[in-house]
Amino acid sequence: MKISANNIGKQEEKQYFLLILLIMFVSAFSIFGGIMEPDGALYASIAKNMVLNADWANLYVRGQDWLDKPHLTFWLASFSFELLGINGLAYKLPSLLIGWIGCYYLYLLTSTFYDRKTGLIATLIYMTAFHVAISNFDVRAEIYLSTFTIASTYHYYRAYESSAAHIIAGSFFLACAVMVKGIFVVIPVLGSFICYWLFSKQYKEFFKIKWWSAFALIGVFIVPELYTLYIQFDMHPEKFVFDRQQVSGIQFFFWDSQFGRFFNTGPIKGKGDISFFLHTILWAFLPWCIVFYIAIVNNLTNWKKNKEKSSVLIISMSALIAFLLFSLSKFQLPHYIIIIFPHFAIITASYLKDIDKGMLKTLSIVQHVIFSIVTILLILIALVFNFPHKVLSIALSVGIAILAYMLFFNTSLKNLIFRSAFLSITFMVFAYGFFYPALLRYQAGMSAGVWLKKYEPHRQVIAYKASSFALDFYAPGEVKYADNLSTLSQGKLYSTLFFIQEEELTALKENFKVKVLRRFDHYHITKLTLNFLNHKTRPSSLSTFYLVEIQ
């Protein structure tokens, strides 16, 4: 017997809405923490420079032209800075709000493909995926990108199904995605429709004006990006970018930024592992990873029956094309996969909506095991890391687990989904309330910037033989960089504060009288090791930075 999502009554549907609101409430606490290095702090410092220089066209990092990502992420953060001031909350808020818009579009698309309840399930799955929770705190570009791609897919599907007017909205959102990450995002979105038309032999779609107009509209909507790249780079071939001259920003945008990385021919290179994202999903898509892989196997088993269904083919092809692009690329990072998490959520929800009782019992056992393992791991991390209020974090983790099983103990589809969602809530409370705040204590640039803003807001700061994007963002004004003190005037030498590593401090003391204002422990907190996590061995993992003045 199959358990259909359509059998869920109005009362349970309200419970789904309430759970979504609860998850939104908990996830909102992610914006109150600090900004993590390197990418988050780098992007925040670029947006800060935009506001300080009143220059929204040129991207600069430490006074140098910067060509790596398009502008839209920085425009959104800069606009938020203008409204709320230059701070971490203002940087993170646009990502959170646009992420919620993406959840709404995910619900709309899934409801259009299936029904309202499946839409609610897919939305819950996406919102509670662990890497989405992490990305709400460590804000980069992927939440923006997942929203814009799923929104464009929804509007293009509506344009295909009923109203051609949706072409404008679909092209606008796809252009936004392009101005966040690059031109490659067009491939999985439009490629999924092309595959569907080929499989279903709808060749006439290729000759419809509305689809060709979509390309023209995308071109129109990305004009601001092309214009800013042109005036910063193409108009100035004398500039040195990537250690060479005559660099075209427009060429980088259309080719080197994404396809250059894919073929490893661009200025930014990497090393690829074709299996990288297969095992990344196992932790990034928790607590749904096992259910998702089972759903994939089920779709492959029933491929002949499903290949004519627009819902299955469009979402599956979009996810597959993007996944292959990521996997075959020579440049791979775990957060890239978030872009297709909405697709994973739809695939998982569509499988769960018609699950039979036997498989439901099996999946309930699987989710029980995942719940237990993750909860135990969170408790162990609290004990080993020994962060402040660890007893409270353990009590909350255990308390939420007990509450989840008291409310949703029996075997049913709703209980399986709600229990899994409560596990994600446990993770968010642990991460946002305890773990990340403890980690950020070891981000020396952030700690130094906060101290400067409080005690020395008007002093010029020079990072001497040191680098910290967090310092760039959190310090008041603009941080200068120097590798040789002889290049500084005597007035600047004695009126400036220096951010410096311990080994350089020792050398500095040999030639100058130095006053240490503050000491900061530092660790690269996005690359965690057991040696660092264990509070007993942590001191050996730390480096030390200082704020000093020369007297």
Image (cartoon, grey):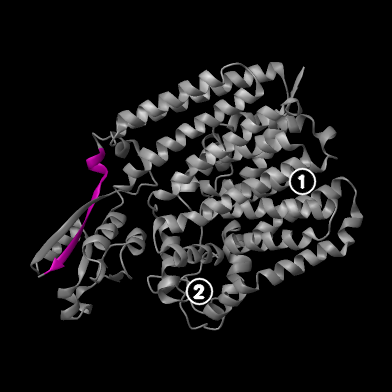
Q: Give the range drawn in magenta.
A: 538-550
- Kindly identify the residue that appears in the image at 63 percent across and 62 percent down: 176
Quadrant of the snapshot with the N terminus: top right
**Percent position of residue 319, x then y:** 68, 45
- For residue 129, say whether it is visible: no
Distance CA(mark 1)–CA(mark 2)? 37 Å
In which quarter of the view is residue 507 placed? bottom left
Circle 2: is it few (<14), some (14-19), or many (20+) Cα within 10 Å? some
Q: Quadrant of residue 456?
A: bottom left
Task: Identify the mark at residue 56; answer none if there is no mark.
Answer: 2
> Which secondary structure lies at badge 1?
helix
Q: If you read the primary sequence from the N terminus, does the residue marked by circle 1 or circle 2 appear first? A: 2
Along the horizontal axis of the image, is 239 left or right of 8?
left
x and y, in percent, of residue 286 in the image: 54, 34
Location of residue 40 (image quadrant): bottom left
Of badges 1 and 2, the one in the foreground is: 2
Q: Do the residues labelled 1 and 2 touch (CB within 8 Å)?
A: no
Our reading of the magenta stretch's main secondary structure is strand
Q: Residue at x 68, y 34 (%)?
A: 349
